Image (cartoon, grey):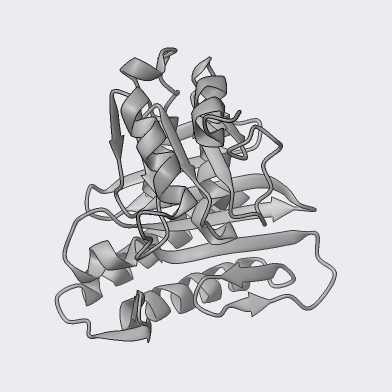
Amino acid sequence: MSFREIAVDAARLGGRILEEWRPKFTAREKSPSNLVTEADLASQQAIFEFIRERCPDHRFLGEEGLCHDEGDSPFRWIIDPLDGTSNYVHGFPYYAVSIGLEQMGRLIAGAIYDPCRDEMFSAEAGGGATRNDEPIQVSDATDLSDALCMASLPVKSNRGDPAVQRFLRVLEAAQHVQRTGSAALNLCGVACGRVDAFWSTSLHPWDMAAGVLIVREAGGEATKTDGRAFDVNSPDLLATNGTELTAALVRHLAGPEF
């Protein structure tokens, strides 16, 4: 079984658990601005056990406190058992399971499963990206005024937050800008051409590891919002279709002083 297949099967397992819990979960607050559910924890544990059985010497990093980092394996699984927790809690059907694998810091496999639409996005380095096993590619949009963009903002950010100011600058220039609550699905949207670009400066590795690989393998580009090289351990991400949109967005995100 390939790493891509392991990621796909594990993501589907996590998604099935989320849907089993959906009618009956109880929510508790991890912090005033961030809800977590028993479903989240159950999904992560099942994913961890599934992959661990097949890759016993690999390392793990997960959103819900999962840090299995002993040993010197070059492989690390980066897991988000429920990306879009607030959407899930409120019954808004825009959430996913995201599983990425890196080897010595290089993303090599990933899968993102949307249980609401039964859509499985996956990729492996050099092997292209797919949606439900069909090849996907990014859009060919080049003009920001024609582009549909997605953004993630910090929870409860105020109007003076730099992230909000960046959002407003692009809002004035793009055809549409949306905030949806799932970075993983936003990245899948870029990869399959439904969305032309996505950015955020408040992400974690598990929000983007799988999605960045899927975007790249679909022909897109991932950098920081200022155009510098992407780093999975940095919260800063701009993902685009790789056309002139990238430079246009870098300019708008940098601000009028750029």
* Residue 1 in sight: no
Picture coordinates of residue 90, whole percent (x, y): 18, 68
Q: Is residue 88 above or below residue 170?
A: below
User: Residue, x 50% and y 45% (percent of image)?
Assistant: 211
Q: The C terminus appears in which quarter of the rendering?
A: top right
**Is any atom of residue 142 visible in this view?**
yes
Residue reaching furthest right? 72
Q: Image height check: is 108 above or below 139?
A: below
| Residue 138 image position (x, y, % from top left) | 44, 23
Residue at the (35%, 75%) spot, across then down: 33
Question: Which residue appears at 69% of the width and 72% of the height?
Answer: 56
Q: Is residue 32 left or right of residue 59?
A: left
Q: Quadrant of residue 84?
A: bottom left
Q: Residue 171's spot in the image, x, y percent?
A: 33, 32
Where's residue 26, x and y in %?
A: 22, 85
Pick whichever, 5 or 24, lies toward us: 24
257, 254: nearer the viewer: 257
Residue 110 lies, with reference to residue 96, above or below; the image says above
Asked if residue 61 is positioned above or below residue 247 in the image, the reply reads below
Q: Is residue 61 left or right of residue 34?
A: right
Residue drawn at point x = 49 percent, y = 20 percent: 245
Quarter of the image where one finds residue 257: top right
Residue 47 relative to residue 73: left or right: left
| For residue 193, side relative to residue 5 (left or right) | left
Q: Disc count in the image?
A: 0
Q: Quadrant of residue 108?
A: top right
